[in-house]
Image (cartoon, helix red, strand yellow):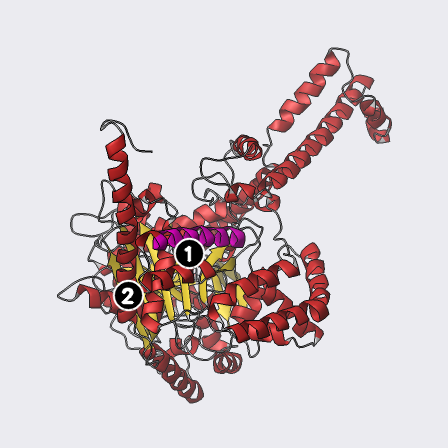
Amino acid sequence: MAEAHQAVAFQFTITPEGIDLQLSYQALNQIYLSGVRSWKKRVSRMKNRVIKGVYPASPSSWLFVAIGILATMYMQSDPSMGLIAKIQQHLPLSLHVSLSSQGQTMVSALVFSTLLWLSLILALRFCLKLLLSYHYWMFEQHGRVSNTTKVWVTLMRLFSRKKPLLYSYQTSLPHLPVPGIQDTLSRYLESVRPLLTDSEFQQMTKLANEFESTLGHRLQRYLKLKALWATNYVSDWWEEYVYLRSRGPIMVNSNYYGMDFLYVTPTSVQAARAGNTITALMLYRRKVNREELTPSRVPGTVIPLCAAQCERMFNTTRTPGVETDVLLHWQDSEFVAVYHRGRYFRLWVYRAGRLLSPREIEYQIQRILDDSSPPFPGEEKLGALTAGDRIPWAQMRQQFFRSGLNKKSLDAIEKAAFFITLDDEEQGMKGDDPAGNLDRYAKSLLHGKCYDRWFDKSFSIVIYKNGKSGLNAEHSWADAPTVAHLWEYTLATDAFQLGYTEEGHCKGEVDLSLPPPQRLVWEISPEVQTQVCSSLAVAQALADDVDCHVFPFRDFGKGRIKKCRISPDAFIQISLQLAYYRDRGGFCLTYEASMTRLFREGRTETVRSCSKDSSAFVRALESGQTEEECRRLFRLASEKHQNLYRMAMTGAGIDRHLFCLYVVSKYLGVDSPFLHKVLSEPWRLSTSQTPVQQLELFDLKNNPDYISLGGGFGPVADDGYGVSYIIVGEDLINFHVSSKHSCSETDSHRFGAQIQKALQDIMALLSADAKSSSSSKGSNQPQSKKLP
């Protein structure tokens, strides 16, 4: 094969005259450049380790400490209080012989300066950890900040003046605390009260009390022991038992998707869009590797969030196992895997240590699009193995992909930086049915044809025929905000930094001597082809059952909600409660994802949005109580929701604690009726907000059409809804609703209409209050005076 010949650095032939050595200088040059690149990476990593290790100080601060000590000694003063003299006494004999007395004093002073510098760094890091452990600021009312918090804010700003690297804060972040078992049980019972009848609640209270008095404290002791030993007492078990041990399909059930711009497609040239997208993603990977990304922070503050999830963003694949899957992460690869019309390709995006230009990547992608070669037997639908049940895929991988051509080709996919599908379909909000097209767009990204995505990759990019793009992300390695941050950067870099020519092509020059993309070769046995068909049937049934509805809500956005002095998230969550009540005639256990990244290796916690206060408001509104009473109950529900969200963020949630207690009980081989009942309760309304994290990348004032559609996920319960939303700018909220056709009680379009009506009704309720307040204040105040 041509690739094998290009990889040979030298050849030799034995002749009667001796050995004829033939060197390939091009190959040797590649080896040399590869070595140089490797050493540059090592030096960069070593430099970053030093910078992170001394943060919030800097390496140069050692020089100031050393100069200060030496200057003080020059003035005949001993700042060490005799320690320098003691260090001098314990210097190696060789230094006593080779150095003068003054030289020995100098070396001892430098040793003392270094020890003092390290001590100061440890003190600073301890202080920073204490500051980051303070969370009371989150619970204080706006405009009523305590003196303690004011001092804390000042100190945090002082510590944050130096520009940090991506992972600078990691070792200073506090560990996730284990809540008190009595507190968790009390919060749990409060959360389920509006969902249970009196007799059901009495039974649940009895189970909770029995658990606390018998098994609970024993399990809690084991959990506290783990919290002392592990970095995070939740994350490793959450990754393993919630994601990796799941034996059902990860397509739809676990993976989620992200969409392109709503109104704009930067280019209609498929190869060009792929070229810029791949370039932007590789630039992001470079920033992650060099730790040049600014750490994510709590919006509007200097409080950093854990960045550990960035470590496995690229070059990562979930590999199937019979009992549990495994996440494998490799060193940076210089290629991506591409799927087009049933064929797999390896596309090298680096040459001689240089990232190809967007125009060159477009040229290579166009070569793939123009390639008319047919798929190998069994190759076209091979990706269905990643879409079906995990056990058959694990068995096939173990038996038929461990050696030979299949292993080499599978390695090329699994070790690739990421996966790309060049889709033959056109998607987006287009044509005579823009709303319906958005629904089809969502389904395409969520599951595609069930065989044209590689669902095991950390994320897969989809580039459609008309230039529209999107992604499908595997869930076990990271949560949606981490992928959303990557996707925001990619869209902004593609549209605003890299750009396109007037003809819609990528910018830059092309090296026509680039070797063509490499076709991956397979030998798919009849047994594998049979299993592919079986996995495809399972995946297709699951995909056909999903009902997706995507709609932009344009009546108002967070700007108008904030004028009512209401949290936008609380407003939407209570609206969802009202919509569900109208849709199903009752309340249900509601999941809202909150993050715990204020803590080291934190992931998510559940906010139980259906509370006693939210249900009281919904019942009051639906029973026709006075507007004044409904507004009062709504504000109580809003404050309650905000408090629940803050508690979840600060480690005082309910569900992760109970989940870990359940895991401990299984390790100990003991059964708890209470924990079994809690963890078997279905989440019939699962919700999540996609955060907009990098507003500075999108100039919405000058480019108002470059609005993100956000992303979504499949329903968690067979008879429930999945709802994702993104608040964009001041006047738009995009919703993604999913459910299953097989459930006669759910309908994504019907529920979407209920969501819109609930939002409108609550805003009308609050606007009526604002108008009455405005008119009453206007009659008592001068016209020119601003309202508070």
In the image, farthest residue toward the top:
75
Q: Amino acid at mark 1?
A: Val
Q: Magenta segment range? A: 629-649
- Residue 479 or 326: which is nearer the viewer? 479
Q: Amino acid at mark 2?
A: Gln
Q: Earlier in the sequence, mark 2 or mark 1?
A: 1
Instruction: Nearest to the eye among marks 2 and 1: give it.
Output: 2
Q: Residue at x 73, y 31 (%)?
A: 115
Quadrant in the rendering for residue 673:
bottom right
Placement of 650 over or under 419, stated as above or below? above
Q: Residue at x 53, y 52 (%)?
A: 647
- Residue 625 or 571: which is nearer the viewer? 625
Where is residue 453 drawn, in percent x and y?
36, 70
> Split into 4 quadrants, where in the image is the N terminus?
bottom left
**Residue under pointer 2:** 754
Circle 2 sits in a helix, a strand or a loop, which is it?
helix
Q: Is residue 564 left or right of residue 173?
A: left
Q: Residue at x 47, y 78 (%)?
A: 248
Residue 461 visible, this angle: no
Where is residue 361 drawn, in percent x and y?
31, 55
Q: Is residue 369 left or right of residue 149?
A: left
- Residue 275 or 634: which is nearer the viewer? 634
Quadrant in the rendering for residue 425:
bottom left
Whether tag 2 and tag 1 are in contact, CB under 8 A, the answer is no
Placement of 275 over or under 586, stated as above or below? above
Q: Magenta stretch containing residue 541, yes or no?
A: no
Placement of 192 over or under 767, stated as above or below? below
**Residue under pointer 1:** 483
Residue 499 visible, this angle: yes
